[in-house]
Image (tube, rainbow, N blue to C red):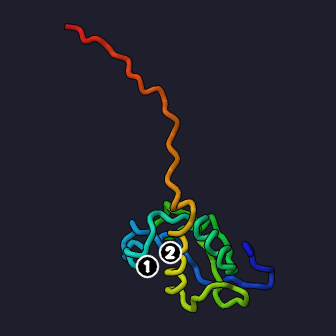
Amino acid sequence: MASPTSDQSTDKWLTIYPTYLDKKASVSGGRRVSKALAVENPSIQEIRLVCERLKVPYVLEINKLYPRDFLNPGRIRVSLNQPGAECKSKTKCEFLRELVQLIAQLKSRNEPPTPKAATSSSKSSKKKKK
């Protein structure tokens, strides 16, 4: 479901940028959900995983940029009114809330980072000259 068929037009599909869900972004910076619900630094790949889980038709556009946050590339076009989708949301606002809740439950978010291999932490002691 990563790309629509050639006769389907994505012009009227919902557009979702990662900044809409970012806890660090301000409302004037582009955040669309409340700070209590938002997640920190959501990636376009996490949004894609949730769309696949919900069986919602989507198109991933990696080269597109959000004008208010052009350092975080990518956007997703989503169609909510397709039959067979497990999405309960009818509006964009409800869908964004559902996305945030499912992104927070992803394994990549819940697993603690693996500790890096211990490098040689022995410091060479140098004698000070008097």
Residue 90: assigned label: none
Q: In this view, does 6 lie to the left or right of 27?
A: right
Q: Which of 100 and 81 is in front in this view?
A: 100
Amino acid found under the numbered disc labelled 2:
Val
Residue ranking furthest to the top: 130
Tags 1 and 2 touching, CB below 8 Å: yes
How far apart are the alpha carbons under marks 1 and 2? Answer: 8 Å
Task: Please provide percent x and percent y for residue 67.
Answer: 48, 70
Above or below 117: residue 38: below
Task: Please provide percent x and percent y for residue 93.
Answer: 49, 86
Q: Nearer the viewer, residue 39 or 26?
A: 39
Quadrant where the N terminus sits is bottom right
Q: Is residue 63 visible?
A: yes
Q: Can residue 68 be seen in this view?
A: no
Residue 33: assigned label: 1
Amino acid found under the numbered disc labelled 1:
Val
Task: Please provide percent x and percent y for residue 30.
Answer: 43, 74
- Residue, disc 2: 100
Q: Quadrant of residue 9?
A: bottom right
Disc number lying in front (1 or 2)? 2
